Image (spheres, rainbow, N blue to C red):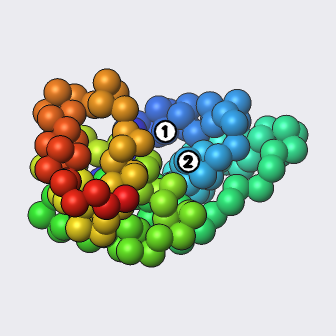
Amino acid sequence: MFRSDGLLRGAREDRTEAISSLGRAKWSLEVLLDLHCGLLDHAEEVRVAAMEALQEISKQEPDPVALTPVKLMSYFLFSFTVSSGIAVKCFKFLVELDTPDAQEAVGQALARVHRNEDFKEFVGILRQANKLEMLRELDPTNLSQTKAAILRSALASNTNGTK
């Protein structure tokens, strides 16, 4: 439904229907960003659907969406090409930032990463930063066989007893 630039794609009717359905969604950062795309759409019908969805959500009196730069960075972390290198660069930044918000984003990135190569780099960054506790918190049964092997290897090779 979304193009690589984050905007909606497809027929106007499909875009309108997708945006309208957000009126039944629970208010979240993802819904906010999707509605924002709808509000930016070139078709007025889609923009109207976004406003109507916002009205429906408003009736639920939802809590505000907590938006920080880290949360926004985390949300878009995997929306870039591999060749840009931004996912690994931002992951390293988040590990070094080491705030509660950044630690949560690191955990989410470890759970969301698809490419084994990225997972291996993420594990290496955490090992280098001496953040092995984050690796120990991962459940290998929720990982692919390859990622579980990468995790086991990283934890087994840590013989100096760091945290």
Report x, y in % for residue 99: 54, 70
Report x, y in % for residue 161: 28, 57
Residue picked out by circle 2: 30
Report x, y in % for residue 121: 18, 57
Mark 2: which secondary structure? Answer: helix
- Please tell me whether residue 141 is drawn above or below residue 154 in the rendered image: above
Residue picked out by circle 1: 15
Q: Quadrant of the C terminus?
A: bottom left
- Quarter of the image for residue 52 reads top right
Crowd around label 1: few <14 · some 14–19 · many ≥20 (10 Å): many
Q: Residue at x 18, y 67 (%)?
A: 85
Q: Closer to the camera, 40 or 119?
A: 119
Q: Closer to the camera, 160 or 151?
A: 160
Q: Are marks 1 and 2 in contact (CB under 8 Å)?
A: no
Q: Residue at x 87, y 40 (%)?
A: 59
Q: Earlier in the sequence, mark 1 or mark 2?
A: 1
- Please tell me whether residue 98 is drawn above or below residue 50 in the rendered image: below
Give amino acid for label 2: Glu
Report x, y in % for residue 7: 42, 54
Horizontal arrangement in the rendering, residue 46 relative to residue 160 (left or right): right
Regarding residue 147, the answer to whether it shows in the image is: no
Give amino acid for label 1: Arg
- Please tell me whether residue 62 is drawn above or below residue 6 in the rendered image: above
Q: Closer to the camera, 62 or 21?
A: 62
Q: Closer to the camera, 83 or 20?
A: 83
Crowd around label 2: few <14 · some 14–19 · many ≥20 (10 Å): some
Q: Residue at x 63, y 63 (%)?
A: 67
User: What is the CA distance from the residue labelled 1 to the residue labelled 2?
Assistant: 16 Å
| Residue that protrudes farthest toward the top in the picture | 141
- Quarter of the image for residue 115 reads top left
Mark 1: which secondary structure? Answer: helix
